[in-house]
Structure formats: C-alpha cells, structure tokens
C-alpha cells in the first residue's frame, strides 16, 4: 500500500508539475506573443513617424521652393513695374518738354506776327499821315494859286 501511495503521489506530483510547466509555457508563449506584438507596434509606429517626418520635410521643401518662386516673381514684377514707371516718366518728361518747345515756338510766332502787324499799322499810319500832308500841301498850293 505504501508503494502504491508513493506511486500515486509521484504520479500526482508529476501531473501537477506537468500542468504547472504547461501553464508556465503557455504564459511564456503568451508573454512572447505580447512582446512580439509590442515590438511590431513600436516598429509600425516608428515607420509611420519616419514616413510622416519625411513627408513633412518634403512638403516643407516644396513650400519653401514655391515661396522662393513667388518671391522671384514678385521681385521680377516689382522690377518690371519700376522700369515701366521710369519709361512712363521719361516719356511724360519728353512730351512735356516738346510741348514747352512748341509753346515757345507758337509764342515766338505770335510775337513775330504781332510785331509785323504793329509795323504794318505804323507804316500805314505813317503813309496815311504823309499822304494827308501831301494832299493838304497840294490843296494849299492850289488855293494859293487861285
């Protein structure tokens, strides 16, 4: 009976140890799976972060390039506007000076016409005066002869 009891106790202990080891093995496998999942999740998160970072840098470079292109266009536009303004100013100045010259020419012509008119009137008056004097002299001569 003692042998049987020892044998039964040994089998019970063996079964208990087997069950305990199987439970520990399942727990270890479960923990290993959890660690693997955590590792994969960490790797996935790292890959996603690196991808987002790369995309962000690429978008930032793109925006920087676009801003540079806009700045170039703005600078060129400002330069073109400045050149156009200078040309319009030069043309306006040239037209103004031409008009001044034309006005001076017209004034000189008017003064010449006015001087000619005054001279003509003065000569006409002088002629009429001399003619009147001659007519008076001739009339007086005719009167004195009669």
Image (cartoon, helix red, strand yellow):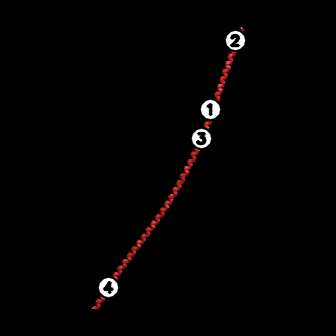
Query: Sequence order check: which comes first, mark 2 or mark 4?
Result: 4
Which disc is residue 107 wearing? 1
Find out whether the residues at labels 2 and 3 contact each other: C-beta distance under 8 Å: no
Q: Is residue 107 above or below residue 140?
A: below
Residue hosting label 4: 13
The Cα–Cα distance between marks 1 and 3, rounded to whole angstroms, is 21 Å
Q: Left or right: 35 with respect to 110?
A: left
Query: Sequence order check: which comes first, mark 4 or mark 1?
Result: 4
Placement of the N terminus among the 4 image quadrants: bottom left
Residue hosting label 3: 93
Q: Quadrant of residue 146?
A: top right
Find out whether the residues at labels 1 and 3 contact each other: C-beta distance under 8 Å: no
- Secondary structure under badge 1? helix
The Cα–Cα distance between marks 2 and 3, rounded to whole angstroms, is 69 Å
The Cα–Cα distance between marks 2 and 4, rounded to whole angstroms, is 184 Å
Within 10 angstroms of label 2, few (less than 14), some, or many (20 or more) residues? few
Query: Sequence order check: which comes first, mark 2 or mark 3?
Result: 3
- Secondary structure under badge 3? helix
Q: Quadrant of residue 6?
A: bottom left
Find out whether the residues at labels 2 and 1 contact each other: C-beta distance under 8 Å: no
Q: Is residue 110 above or below residue 31?
A: above
Q: Position of residue 95 (x, y in %)?
A: 60, 39
Within 10 angstroms of label 3, few (less than 14), some, or many (20 or more) residues? few
- Secondary structure under badge 4? helix
Within 10 angstroms of label 1, few (less than 14), some, or many (20 or more) residues? few
The Cα–Cα distance between marks 2 and 1, rounded to whole angstroms, is 48 Å
Query: Sequence order check: which comes first, mark 1 or mark 3?
Result: 3
- Secondary structure under badge 2? helix
């Amino acid at each position: 009976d003692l042998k049987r009891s020892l044998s039964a106790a040994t089998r019970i202990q063996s079964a208990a140890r087997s069950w305990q080891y199987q439970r520990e093995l399942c727990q270890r496998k479960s923990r290993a799976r959890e660690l693997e999942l955590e590792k994969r999740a960490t790797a996935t998160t790292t890959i996603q972060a690196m991808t987002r970072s790369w995309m962000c840098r690429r978008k930032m470079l793109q925006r920087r390039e676009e801003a540079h292109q806009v700045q170039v266009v703005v600078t060129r536009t400002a330069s073109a506007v400045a050149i156009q303004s200078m040309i319009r100013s030069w043309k306006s100045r040239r037209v103004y000076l031409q008009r001044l010259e034309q006005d001076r020419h017209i004034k000189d012509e008017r003064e010449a016409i006015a001087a000619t008119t005054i001279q003509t009137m003065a000569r006409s008056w002088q002629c009429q005066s001399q003619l009147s004097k001659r007519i008076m002299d001739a009339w007086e001569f005719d009167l004195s002869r009669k």
